[in-house]
């Protein structure tokens, strides 16, 4: 059937990396009316929210960029958070994204009614949209620990994603709860000003040594002068991270896996005190939890003004943290490096699809998607960074762009009038979900550790196949798996 070009009204939710890329790419596809709803007052998503000391991305900068905005000027192999946030702002401004963003407009509800999505934000009703593209991020709901007495603490306490920069760290006794990527970056950055840092560890981590080398001026000038050189560096990193690393963790390259595990073991062997080393030794397989990258953590935790506390926390009191051995660790500042709820991406929104059933009910026992991008019962609803997106040590920008490439092909069908409504069918959704579960059963993520990859029902948030498979899946939608209503 020949289609007629339609000008679509498209709502984008979130002005982080995914939302920024969406606006720019949509503009290339046609003269659509695009409105971005952003809950905060500026773009940047995770890089806006996370400002804790020591923050860097754990993916190399030259891989962590939009394909349409290569950046020859990254300062470090792993550039600091504020530099990445400046890049996000710059891209949003250079590509004219800002004018279509409605800041301070958090989506409260999205309701499918008579062939369109009615959106309501904290600013009020926003009208109807032909399609919704969500780019709400994966790690944006801070998880607070369920520890008795958290509110009794008399000093300053905050989550790492809500760092209170008005609190001076100088000469303070600082407690850090958690040993994920965030805590491992925070500890080396605060041990200097602090009088003492106590790190409360529930689980020891695998830590890959990786010096964060500055990129010299001459190298940056060479990247500026020769875009081919910059592109070559990107390709090299993409192969190393998405190819070798991912294949290793996915169980497809045992030799690479063993080399990586050995590098972590060698790193751990640099801890001089055998008793401390033993307490820092993980008791599960490398890659089960998200691999941590740091050359700074082991030197920091061995300092006399740092202490690794492995007795479990029994409660928090006005004066500090009480551990199971009865000891009170006196503290002035308590940093909650306790991660995020990665399993309720739309927790703040009431989403109601064609059946009238809220998505929160449908997803009550786990998020079910078709290839992480679309959802049965939600017509013209497309997700970037949705459940079961690749979550390993990849560039999320690259992942979002791959998903966007897929989504735009579906949007083009709407624009061409070849469909009014696009919804994945139940059977292929169930088949994909089952394949995902089967694949996970024997995977490294299910090999015996606790991680944010799993929800309380044992469903996994990540993508269990190789990055190559993900890229192949995102190349083009299988249209037979969709109901295309005209
Ligand atoms: P993570 O990786 O989820 O780490 C959270 C840490 O907090 C982890 O070590 C948890 O211990 C610990 N935690 C959580 N709750 C508690 C309680 N109640 N008691 C003690 N310890 C607790 O979050 P991050 O922010 O570090 O990193 C998230 C992602 O951001 C990271 O993967 C990168 O993608 C960037 P556990 O290990 O579960 O025993």
Image (cartoon, rainbow, N blue to C red):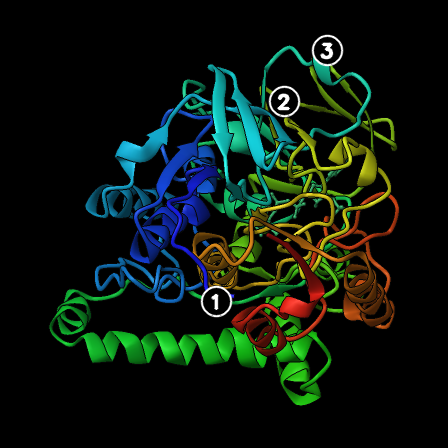
* Ligand 1 is within 8 Å of the C-beta of the residue at disc 3: no
* Mark 3 to mark 1 CA distance (whole Å): 39 Å
Q: Tell me: 36 left or right of 382.
A: left
Q: Is residue 283 visible?
A: no
Q: Residue at x 66, y 89 (%)?
A: 255
Q: Residue at x 37, y 36 (%)?
A: 43
Mark 3 or 2: the one toward you: 3
Give the mark nearest the N terminus, 3 or 1.
3
For disc 1, the marked residue is 210
Q: How many C-alpha atoms fall within 10 Å of the one at disc 1: few (<14), some, or many (≥20)?
A: some
Secondary structure at badge 1 equals loop
Q: Residue furthest front?
A: 1
Q: How many C-alpha atoms fall within 10 Å of the one at disc 3: few (<14), some, or many (≥20)?
A: few
Q: Tell me: 371 left or right of 137.
A: right
Give the mark nearest the N terminus, 3 or 2.
3
Question: Which is nearer the eye, 443 or 432?
Answer: 432
Instruction: Give the image quarter of residue 466.
Output: bottom right
Q: Tell me: 209 left or right of 235.
A: right
Question: Which is nearer the eye, 120 or 135?
Answer: 120
Compared with 261, 307 (above or below) is: above
Q: Is residue 215 visible?
A: yes
Q: Which numbered circle lies on residue 331? A: 2
Secondary structure at badge 3 equals helix
Percent across and percent down for residue 444 are 78, 69
Q: Which numbered circle lies on residue 152? A: 3
Percent across and percent down for residue 156 are 57, 17
Instruction: Give the image quarter of residue 114.
Output: top right
Give the mark nearest the N terminus, 1 or 2.
1
Compared with 370, 441 (above or below) is: below
State ligand 1's quadrant: top right
* Mark 3 to mark 2 CA distance (whole Å): 13 Å
Percent across and percent down for residue 14 are 47, 37
């Amino acid at each position: 059937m020949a289609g007629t070009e339609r000008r679509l009204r498209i709502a984008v939710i979130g002005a982080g990396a995914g939302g920024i890329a969406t606006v720019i790419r949509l503009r290339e596809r046609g003269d659509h009316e695009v409105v971005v709803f952003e809950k905060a007052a500026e773009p940047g998503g995770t890089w806006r929210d996370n400002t804790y000391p020591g923050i860097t991305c754990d993916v190399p900068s030259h891989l962590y960029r939009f394909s349409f905005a290569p950046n020859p000027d990254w300062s470090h192999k792993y550039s600091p958070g504020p530099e990445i946030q400046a890049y996000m702002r710059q891209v949003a401004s250079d590509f004219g994204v800002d004018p279509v963003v409605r800041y301070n407009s958090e989506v409260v509800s999205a309701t499918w009614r008579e062939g369109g999505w009615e959106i309501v934000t904290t600013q009020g009703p926003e009208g109807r949209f032909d399609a919704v593209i969500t780019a709400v991020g994966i790690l944006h709901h801070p998880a607070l620990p369920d520890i008795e007495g958290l509110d009794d603490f008399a000093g300053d306490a905050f989550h790492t994603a809500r760092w209170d920069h008005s609190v001076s760290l100088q000469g303070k006794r600082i407690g850090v709860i958690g040993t994920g990527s965030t805590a491992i970056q925070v500890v080396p950055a605060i041990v200097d000003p602090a009088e003492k840092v106590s790190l409360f560890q529930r689980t020891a981590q695998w830590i890959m040594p990786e010096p964060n080398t500055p990129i010299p001026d001459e190298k940056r000038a060479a990247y500026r002068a020769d875009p081919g050189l910059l592109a070559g560096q990107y390709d090299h990193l993409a192969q190393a991270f998405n190819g070798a690393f991912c294949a290793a963790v996915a169980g497809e390259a045992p030799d690479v896996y063993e080399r990586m595990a050995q590098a972590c073991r060698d790193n751990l062997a640099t801890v001089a005190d055998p008793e401390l080393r033993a307490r820092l030794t993980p008791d599960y397989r490398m890659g089960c939890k998200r691999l941590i990258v740091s050359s700074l953590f082991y030197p920091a935790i061995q300092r006399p003004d740092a202490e690794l506390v492995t007795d479990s926390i029994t409660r928090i009191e006005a004066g500090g943290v009480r551990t199971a051995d009865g000891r009170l660790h006196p503290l002035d500042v308590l940093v909650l490096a306790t991660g995020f709820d990665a399993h309720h991406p739309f927790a703040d929104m009431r989403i109601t699809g064609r059946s009238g059933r809220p998505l929160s009910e449908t997803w009550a026992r786990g998020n079910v998607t078709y290839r992480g991008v679309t959802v049965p019962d939600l017509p013209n609803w497309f997700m970037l960074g949705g459940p079961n997106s690749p979550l390993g040590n990849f560039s999320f920008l690259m992942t979002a762009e791959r998903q966007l490439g897929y989504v735009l092909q579906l949007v083009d069908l709407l624009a061409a009038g070849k469909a009014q409504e696009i919804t994945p069918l139940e059977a292929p959704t169930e088949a994909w979900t089952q394949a995902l579960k089967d694949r996970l059963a024997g995977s490294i993520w299910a090999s015996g550790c606790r991680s944010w990859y799993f929800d309380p029902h044992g469903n996994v948030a990540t993508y269990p196949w190789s990055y190559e498979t993900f890229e192949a899946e995102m190349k083009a939608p299988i249209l037979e798996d969709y109901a295309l209503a005209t």
